[in-house]
Image (cartoon, grey):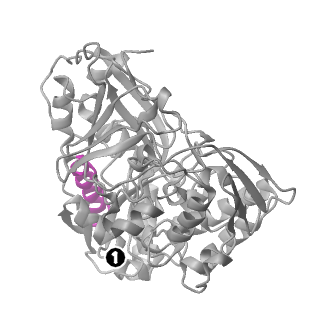
């Protein structure tokens, strides 16, 4: 999700709440603006699609060559269609007639500028690896190539964009729907510099415009009349309200102040029974996990990391403590990844006494200190308390481990993850596109801050490189499966849960669909309409 380090989203919340009756907000009177109000857990890091670590807001402001449907399938965006050469190395996109919000036309040259800007080291974008299949992309983003004309992106005419690839990439349309491939307005950036994303300066090409951004308050978008498909956008405004406390957001929902709210695990059985029509349960391509800092003490011996993974009882964690319908995870990739067979570890089928015995032997063989002392980074949100308490207790009871829990505000925790300033930490990842590479590339040695563990294994990198150039799709998947198996043996991460979202959606709000990538484009919302 597009989320990139979206560690505050997706884990179950465990909040005590008294019984209540949900209030359904009245539909706006005829002629009144149609406004949808949605909670967010923290402010976005940026509204610049080339610089954000990941937020769903840019999807409402900008549209790339391709984009996402309400259910997160790839559909045409700025491009009405595309052609592929017989060898799969040249893709030609045909652009529609479209305007920036300032009235200037969106042209193929805007995409050439935007791809070059996204890859320019001066932009310092975190998602440049998504564009790696394009000729010259990696060399430019790494600073080895200064000549931007060497990038395989060209505009033969204002309505035609041509991409040249290093190897066939059938999943390219999904890559191009991500934020790093979105166009940005050269005219606004050259005039306003870094301030171009302020509400009074922003120019975009998406279904909405930035109306206002109140830090630590709310961020509001209003309908863009110049969007190429503006006639199909049925709401006038979408307001995202900061609600770091999911319990408070639930209370706002129950009195009709919000149209959507995450369901705390404690309340799931009751709400499912009492309000089934308002419940949206949806598995997403996402995994919650513990990141291990491979540059710290735990990076020295895989046996210690394996022992920590062995003694976490994921069935108890998800089915008796969290209880949000999430699946216990033993692999990084979720089981619903199309065409991919997740390489489940051999120990996953052992009984817990057998796993504990193996873990104790691993610690002894590694010469781990007794007692082993750990520092666990968590986020200062109620959603993490049950996870933290249960896991630290499991480590202590099984292996005598003493764990000091460090809790930080979300932004601080995100910064610490990016800079490897932790020993072991909660994190999660939701796929940017429906392909195993969106997970596995995160752990390559060149992934930068997207790789919070700092994992670097030449064998793993080599398997990913082979997969990138594999011409046979089945052979590619086998290489990716082998890379995950190798990574899991190294254990730079400890998978915990495959994500399922449990959400209350107001009966008056339509178009908020079950979405495999966890994205809910507001352009498909409507109020009081089927």
Q: Can you say whether 371 is above or below 175 in the image? A: below
User: Relative to 198, does residue 265 appear above or below in the rendering?
Assistant: above
Nearest the viewer among 118 and 254 is 118
Q: Residue 203: percent from the left, percent from the top? A: 40, 53
Give the farthest residue toward the right. 86
Task: Describe the element under mark 1 as helix, strand or loop.
Answer: loop
**How busy is the neighbourhood of tag 1: few (under 14 within 10 Å), some, or many (20 plus)?**
some
Instruction: Report the residue marked by disc 1.
Output: 419
Q: Residue at x 56, y 60 (%)?
A: 110
Residue 34 lies, with reference to residue 400, above or below; the image says: above
**Which sits in the foreground, 383 or 167?**
167
Main SS, magenta region, reads helix
What residue lies at 38% left-to-right and 52% top-to-bottom? 55
Report the residue at 42% width, 47% height from top: 61
Percent from the top left, x then y, of residue 86? Answer: 87, 56
Q: Position of residue 28 (x, y in %)?
A: 26, 17
Q: The C terminus lies in which quarter of the figure?
A: top left
Q: Nearer the viewer, residue 91 or 43?
A: 91
Residue 261, image quadrant:
top left
Range covered by the magenta-colored residues: 383-400
* Residue 80 position in % (x across, y down): 67, 41
Q: Is residue 427 magenta?
A: no
Magenta stretch encompasses residue 386: yes
In the rendered image, which quarter is residue 129 located in? bottom right
Any part of residue 185 in sight: yes
- Quick check: 79 left or right of 114? right
């Amino acid at each position: 999700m597009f989320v990139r380090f979206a560690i505050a989203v997706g884990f179950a919340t465990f909040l005590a709440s008294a019984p209540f009756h949900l209030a359904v907000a009245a539909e706006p009177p005829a002629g009144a603006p149609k406004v949808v109000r949605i909670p967010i857990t923290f402010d976005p890091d940026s509204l610049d699609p080339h610089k954000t670590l990941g937020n769903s807001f840019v999807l409402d402001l900008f549209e790339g060559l391709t984009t996402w449907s309400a259910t997160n399938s790839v559909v045409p965006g700025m491009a009405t269609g595309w052609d592929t050469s017989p060898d799969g190395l040249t893709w030609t996109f045909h652009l529609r007639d479209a305007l920036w919000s300032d009235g200037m036309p969106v042209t193929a040259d805007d995409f050439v500028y935007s791809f070059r800007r996204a890859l320019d080291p001066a932009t310092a974008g975190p998602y440049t690896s998504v564009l790696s299949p394009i000729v010259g992309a990696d060399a430019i983003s790494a600073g080895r190539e200064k000549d931007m004309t060497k990038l395989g992106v060209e505009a033969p005419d204002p309505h035609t964009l041509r991409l040249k690839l290093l190897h066939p990439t059938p999943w390219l349309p999904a890559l191009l729907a991500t934020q790093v491939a979105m166009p940005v307005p050269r005219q606004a950036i050259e005039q306003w510099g870094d301030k171009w994303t302020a509400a009074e300066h922003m120019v975009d090409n998406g279904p909405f415009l930035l109306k206002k951004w109140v830090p630590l308050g709310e961020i509001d978008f209003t309908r863009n009349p110049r969007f190429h498909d503006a006639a199909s956008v049925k709401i006038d405004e979408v307001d995202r309200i900061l609600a770091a406390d999911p319990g408070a957001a639930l209370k706002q929902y129950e009195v009709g102040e919000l149209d959507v709210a995450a369901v705390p695990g404690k309340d799931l059985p009751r709400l499912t029974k009492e309000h089934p029509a308002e419940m949206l349960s949806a598995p997403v391509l996402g995994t919650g996990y513990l990141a291990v800092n491979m540059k710290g003490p735990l990076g020295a011996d895989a046996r210690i990391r394996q022992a920590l993974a062995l003694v976490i009882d994921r069935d108890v964690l998800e089915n008796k403590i969290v209880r949000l319908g999430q699946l216990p995870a033993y692999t990084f990739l979720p089981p619903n990844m199309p065409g991919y067979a997740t390489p489940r570890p051999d120990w996953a089928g052992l009984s817990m006494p057998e796993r504990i015995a193996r873990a104790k032997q691993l610690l002894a063989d590694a010469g781990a200190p007794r007692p082993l002392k750990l520092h666990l980074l968590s986020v200062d949100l109620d959603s993490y308390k049950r996870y933290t308490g249960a896991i630290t207790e499991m480590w202590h009871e099984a292996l005598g481990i003493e764990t000091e829990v460090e809790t930080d505000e979300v932004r601080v925790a995100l910064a610490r993850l990016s800079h490897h300033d932790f020993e072991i930490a909660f994190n999660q990842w939701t796929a940017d596109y429906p392909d195993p590479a969106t997970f596995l590339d995160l752990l390559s040695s060149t992934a930068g801050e997207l790789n919070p563990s700092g994992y670097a294994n030449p064998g793993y990198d080599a398997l990913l490189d082979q997969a990138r150039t594999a011409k046979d799709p089945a052979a590619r998947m086998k290489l990716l499966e082998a890379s995950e198996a190798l990574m899991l043996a190294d254990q730079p991460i400890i998978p915990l849960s495959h994500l399922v979202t449990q959400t209350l959606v107001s009966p008056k709000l339509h178009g908020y669909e079950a979405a495999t990538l966890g994205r809910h484009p507001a352009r498909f919302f409507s109020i009081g309409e089927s």
